[in-house]
Amino acid sequence: MARWYGYKGRILRVNLSTGTASVEELRQDYVKMYIGGVGYAARILWDELRPGVDPLSPDNILIATAGPFTGTLVPGSGNIFWTFKAPMSGAWGETRSGGKFGAWLKYSGFDMIVITGKAPEPVYLYLEGGKAEIRSAKRYWGMTVHEVTDVLKEDTGAHDASVAAIGPGGENLVRFAAIINDYDRAAGRTGGGAVMGSKNLKAVVAAGGEGIEVYDPEGFMEAALEAQRAIRSDPGNQSMGMHGTIGGLLGLNAMGGLPTKNFSTGYFEEAYSISHETLERNYMIKRRACHSCTIGCGRYSYVAYGRFATPPAEGPEYETTDMNGAMPMIGNMEAVIRVNYLASNYGLDTISLGHTISWAIEVYQKGLITKEDTGGLELRWGDADTFVQLVDMIAYRRGFGNLLAEGSYRAAQKLGKGLELVNHVKGLEMPAHDPRVESKLLGIQYMVSPRGACHIHPIYPPFDMMQVDSGLRDFGLPWPMPDRLAETGVRKGEIYRVLAMYGESFNNLGLCNFYAMAPESGVLSPRRLARLYTALTGIEVTPQQILEAGERTWNLKRAFNIREGFSRKDDMLPKRLMMPIETGPARGLKVNDPEGLLNETYDAFGWDRTTGYIRRSTLERLGLKDVADVLAAMGRLSS
């Protein structure tokens, strides 16, 4: 095996059907093309996953991948990414979490794990020092995430290990089940926990045992410390650390952009009761940070007594608070903390969880479903007790919870009612950000993101709302930014293309996107990324090459979806976003021309306006002629 710097150079392949594990070396050509991380994983899924497979069948492939920066001193590099075909959509599946599991995967000797097949009975993986074992998990099946994490550390003797596990949500194949590492860090969206559960894989224990070699230790240390100083100096990063993501809740509410009542409005009169101020004054214990993080946006909180009493645990952050607070109109921080704790323990995505229940409340309130459908439950806005009860029912697929465990889009399809009230793209519910108010760039991302309605993969795109450039002006970002609410004719498609390339480069390197959203002086800009990568790995790259690898990854994921049968018809915003916001400071705002936004975005990426297919010239420019040939043979390539 060649000597690798930054990378471990090893991929662990696990076939759960045969109970075997083997190790192969990273391919240098794929490292050159995709850098690593999500890009490399996307290539494996393109090469090896047969189109049309059921996401919950043994034929699906689950990949856990770190990036070359993971486990090093690069700030914001404490991440793990999981990729698969998504149970929520049947499209590209991708989810990220922080904590330390990504770093411990590298310290255990591997850059990624490729998991195939299905174990005949529950198992877990144990990783240490470049070796892997498949062990029985029969006695752990049925445990919550916190329980199994504690027991596995005790049973293996690896008390400092990082454990990624599923709870009852994943075991019961809830379509939005999450993979939870380090007790409370959620790889939440698109259903990775259900894929893990479908394979009878309860957990992965990464115990460490190895280090990471650095090509130029002095140069890398200098670059890493310079980047850390830059991140710490930015006022926005300082605020993020001080108050966490929930610190933005009151500001969004003041703008009229806090999703409330299933997105019918963006203003919640009880917002203060679920704000960072309420959390910090009454329930927060301390701040938390992921591995190699200089920001520290995590919260650690508890509820001492009462019907929502909750032991100390991480969270809640903004998405959880809005989706399980303002969306169902629950102005009770104790209930939100309780739901956050249950979701982590059961292994559930809090975005789809809260959004799906809020959809059900609206459908019930409009008379489209009755107590006969809900098993006798009355669904009301602001009813915290019933909401908490439904979380338990969903995790164990009991009663009405069995239907909601499918997510709002599939639930509406099964009911034959309420589909027009589902706020989704490609079957994935929208997160707690409204493009009618924040930025039309967000609307573009919802439409074209390969995993569906997503605010953070590959990046949080409202740069026009924040008025930051992240060092991208020299790499094609139009400046100054146009008005955030402007739509066509102001180069929004071109802007989004640059942002998507930049965001995908973070996914390839193994970085948190919170290190991308500031002026150039306070972010991991393309220039900083190239300097860090070259010193770490000894592989010389330019900032432009880093961004091109991001664009290549982005188009490969698009090609994955096209091969699965997706096209322009699936890149559509939900009906509600074309309707005016009903109340609050943003009353009357809507997305006026989604088709025009889509056309300009397709033009910027080199995709066909009519079909949404990628042009051959685009794929060949990116070195993906073989991908183009496959799509051409299927009649799904634009000339």
Image (cartoon, rainbow, N blue to C red):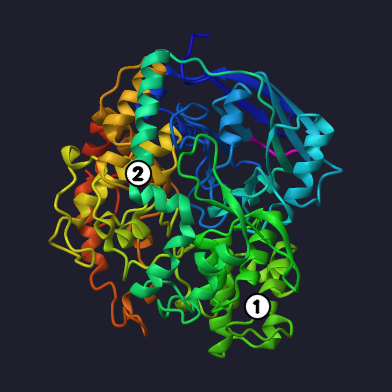
Is 244 situated left or right of 282 in this image?
Answer: left
Q: Which residue is mark 2?
A: 516
**Residue density around tag 1, few if under 14, some if 14–19, many if 20 or more, within 10 Å:** many
Q: Earlier in the sequence, mark 2 or mark 1?
A: 1
Residue extending furthest toward the bottom: 367
Disc 1 residue type?
A: Ala
The secondary structure that most of the magenta stretch takes on is loop
Indicate the secondary structure of the residue bearing disc 2.
loop
**What is the quadrant of residue 221 in the picture?**
top left
Which residue is depicted at the point 67% across and 37% down? 117
Indicate left or right for 416 with 499 as reference: right
Which residue is depicted at the point 49% across and 32% down? 44
What's under tag 2, amino acid-wise? Ala
- Please say whether residue 223 is one of the residues in the magenta stretch: no
- Nearest the viewer among 213 and 372 is 213
Q: Is residue 60 left or right of residue 372?
A: left
Q: Is residue 477 visible?
A: yes
Q: Residue at x 37, y 72 (%)?
A: 257
Q: Is residue 630 visible?
A: no
* Numbered circle sitting on residue 588: none
Horizontal and vertical percent position of residue 459: 37, 48
Residue 201, percent from left and from top: 72, 41
**Residue situated furthest right in the rendering:** 139
Q: Are marks 2 and 1 in contact (CB under 8 Å)?
A: no
Q: Nearer the viewer, residue 235 or 411?
A: 235
Q: Which residue bears the numbered disc 1?
A: 384
- Comparing 170 with 609, the one in front is 170
* Quadrant of the image occupied by residue 132: top right
Q: State whether residue 241 is above or below residue 80.
A: below
Which residues, given as a range, are shown in magenta? 116-121
